[in-house]
Image (cartoon, grey):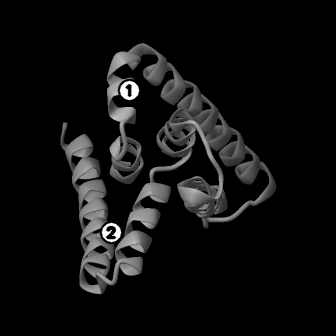
Amino acid sequence: MEFAITAFEADDSCIYWLESMPQTVLVISLGAILGANLRFLIGQLSVKFFHSNLPYGTIFINVTGSFILAFFLAWTAGLVLADPRWRLFVAVGFCGGYTTYSGYAYETFALFEQGKWLFAALNIFVTNALCIAAAFAGYALARAV
């Protein structure tokens, strides 16, 4: 989630972050704990209520995670005054534990918004192609071992 850290370091908060590393790690960790546990709960509930080959839980998590991340980063980018630790708690911790797809979606959106259409399309293609290839490779390696 480079954008969340970059946005956090864009002001003088970087010095504060270095001085309070244990507190920063704790803030991120608490967000990640909440996000990961919510992901697990939603995944379990979706399996219980939706008997299908389609991974409804994962789709729901990726869509809601993308919405939460984009909403929160846009909201705290100028509409409200928020402690920089909230950005780390929600963007890096919660959304990072809830879904990494949210970061990918927001970064791709940011490229589109900046007019970098080619890079956005390249990000979509490369990320999907490499992740699917990595999944095949991981599966093949696990079967070979």
Left or right, 6 with respect to 37, comes to left
Residue corresponding to mark 1? 17
Residue at 55% across / 35% down in the picture?
Answer: 89
Which residue, as the protein is rendered here, is positioned at the far front?
A: 12
Tell me if label 2 and label 1 are in contact, CB under 8 Å: no
> What residue sits right under mark 2 in the picture?
128
> Label 2 vs label 1: CA separation?
33 Å
Q: Amino acid at mark 2?
A: Asn
Badge 1 crowding class, 10 Å Cα cut-off, few under 14, some 14 to 19, many 20 or more, is some
Residue 20's place in the image compared with 57, above or below, is above
Under mark 1, the amino acid is Trp
Q: Secondary structure at mark 1?
A: helix
In the image, which disc is placed on residue 62?
none
Q: Secondary structure at mark 2?
A: helix
Task: Please tell me which residue is depicted at 26% across the width and 70% down the height of the picture.
Answer: 129
For the point 58% across and 32% down, which residue is it?
A: 31
- Residue located at (25% from left, 84% from top): 118
Between label 2 and label 1, give the one nearer the viewer: 1
Q: Which of these two is toward me, 128 or 144?
A: 128
Residue 82 vertical position relative to residue 19 in the rendered view, above or below: below
Quadrant of res 126: bottom left
135, 112: nearer the viewer: 112
- Percent coordinates x, y for residue 133 in the rendering: 24, 63
> Where on the picture, by quarter, is residue 136?
bottom left
Horizontally, is 128 left or right of 109 in the view? left
Q: Quadrant of the C terminus?
A: top left
Q: Residues within 10 Å of mark 2 (few under 14, many from 20)?
A: few
Q: Position of residue 67 (x, y in %)?
A: 62, 63
Give the image location of residue 28, x and y in percent. 49, 29
